[in-house]
Amino acid sequence: MNIKRSIVLRVRIAFIVVALIAGAIFYKIVHLQFVEGEKWAAKSESINFQFRQVSATRGNIYAADGSLLATSLPFYRVVFDPLVAKEEIYRAGIDSLSFLLSSYYRDRSADAYKRMIADARTNGKRYLILNRKQIGYQDMQKMSKWPIFRNGRMGGGVIFEKVEKRYRPFNNLASRTVGFLNEDKYGVGLEYSFNDYLEGKNGKALFQRIAGGSWKPVFDAADVKPDDGYDVLTTLDVNIQDVAESALLRQLINKGAEFGSVIVMEVETGHIKAIANLQKNRNGAYGENYNFAIGDQGLTEPGSTFKLLSMMALLEEGKINLNDEVNTGNGTFRFYDRIMRDVKQGGYGVISIKEAFEKSSNVGISKLVDEHFGAYPSKFTAYIEKAGLDQPIGFQIKGEGAPYFKTPGSKYWYGTTLPWMSIGYEAKLTPLHTLMLYNAVANNGKMVKPMIVQAIAKGNNIEKRFQTEVLRKSIASDKTIKQLQELLEGVVKNGTARNIYSEEYKIAGKTGTAQKLVDGRYTQRYYTSFAGYFPADKPKYSAIIVIDSPKGFNAYGGDVSAPVFKEIADKIYAQDLKINSKTAPNTFQAQSGNEFPYIQAGKVDELQLICNLFGISNHFDGQGEGWVKSVPQVKSIQWKATPTEAPTVPDVSGLPLRDALYVLENKGLRVVYQGKGRVKDQSISPGTPIQQNNIINLILG
């Protein structure tokens, strides 16, 4: 009996406890639903619905001719909400859709795709990533016409999530100059320096949180559309950039150098047409890892290219004449406890000041500077300041290195500082600073600020334009500038760069070779350079080439860097019709009355046929059916063969466009032409070795 009562009591207690718990739960449900309902509904909405950032499309970066250097291409991730499609649409299209997905992605069978979608539909999954592979715009357009998907987002449930990727049509061309920007807003080059313009303003849109922690966009009137970024229009020329990189790379490989840099600039405007920087990687290959042309790591002792500033200071003082003589002795001279040496063993003896510069005599230049400025070194450094070489340029790409010069009277200034500074030691400059000085001499003394971005635009509308900025109206007197130009031409014609002398056009410049300072001691490793401009009689382009630590014999600026300058200059000269002013051959027309028809060049068999029909005497000493030019004779026409078989650029002047295209394109050249009629001029000189896919410009008239 006691046991029965005990069991009944326990049951009643348990029942009461369960009833109390159930009552508490019911009370809590009612309280949450009716008393706190609005509070928790708002909380749920704030958790599951959020306004999230929608990234703006990043602006493009263009070369000077409108070629794309960097752009943002839209890619898409295909996401599916299988619950949206109505049953009849779903059943009618699921088999075809699964087959198309399998055929496109090739990662699973059609049955596997069908099962995946069916399971998601059965389980109420509203955000199904069909495949993580991103697709392009054209594929997105094609997919949007597939079964079920063709009903769109609201009727078929397909979501093409846009993902933008930065794309460079020219791959690694000018890669360090174009630069990059990572997710932490760190970067280099134009992408980083002009990010405020390129990135635009992000928008916002309403997203819903769904199973798996993913967010699905939903339409809402409060959405704010993103404001896409501005485009950056640079001064770069893709053809010159390609030429600069190729020429630099060949020499770096040939000399086994550590790194090299090239800058090509337009003299009058300061527009940078090319910046190339190549550095040897651990595996021995070369890549653009750092912008030595403008950055801190490019700051180094310039060597003999700085002698131009020394000569400017000497000439401006009016105490020397280029024909005056200087005694360089046996090639050594003691300044206090240090000995200055010339490269030539035994020295140059007594030579003119002009020869001292052309031969790059360290002894000659340093003796002159010490003689005229030794008592007042601040007068010499004043010329450095006058030329604007002591301060950063304020270049448009961030990360510019600041020049370094010792100050007279400071604790770092010694008796030997001035003579060594006069030949490019105990000071540091970037290649861009050195080029700015040479460009000013080419520009008749006017120093312009180098620039690489000429405008900011959106579509066809220019939002901001950057004009050429004149830093110094004149860095020296007209007389001094003319003398400096004479000296630089003499270096190429008679001095250390005579190996790049050209009969076709004039080059002016200066070689530089500086010993590398390692752990406080100068070594037998060299920093070689060449800075100059062309054509020297009417300068359009200036350029500087620096190559660090070349290996082998003759590791000097004239042997290492100058040939790169020449190769770049030759190709620019051949392509730029504005500076390549070769005159077209004389047209062969009637010399008396209308005796002869208008004939210049063509296929010999066709021309002979025409002349024979008109009874015109003509002669061809060659054989075959080749291309010929007409040579004026008294009463007849002499055909002169124009060879086209050799692996060089043929002479197509005088040919009709059709024939010129036939000849040149069969040689693997890409032809661009202007005007109508026959070929008057061609940008690549006849006889130049052919490089496949080179562009040749033709002027017709």
Image (cartoon, rainbow, N blue to C red):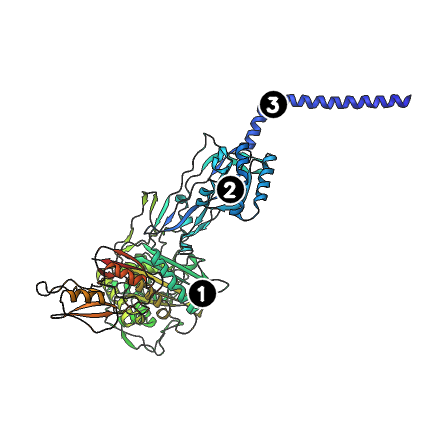
Q: Does 498 sit above or below residue 656?
A: below
| Lower sequence index among marks 3 and 1 | 3
Q: Position of residue 643 (x, y in %)?
A: 27, 69
Q: Position of residue 191 (x, y in %)?
A: 42, 49
Name the residue that disc number 2 marks.
78
Q: Is residue 374 visible?
A: no
Name the residue that disc number 1 marks.
258
Q: Position of residue 654 (x, y in %)?
A: 21, 63
Q: Secondary structure at mark 3?
A: loop
Q: Toward which corner of the image does residue 212 lie, by quadrant?
A: top right
Distance Cα–Cα, label 3 vs label 1: 72 Å
| Lower sequence index among marks 3 and 2 | 3
Please name the amino acid that badge 3 sits on: Glu
Mark 3 Cα-neighbour bin, 10 Å: few <14, some 14–19, many ≥20: few
Q: As drawn, is 45 to the left or to the right of 509?
A: right
Q: As drawn, is 618 to the left or to the right of 213?
A: left
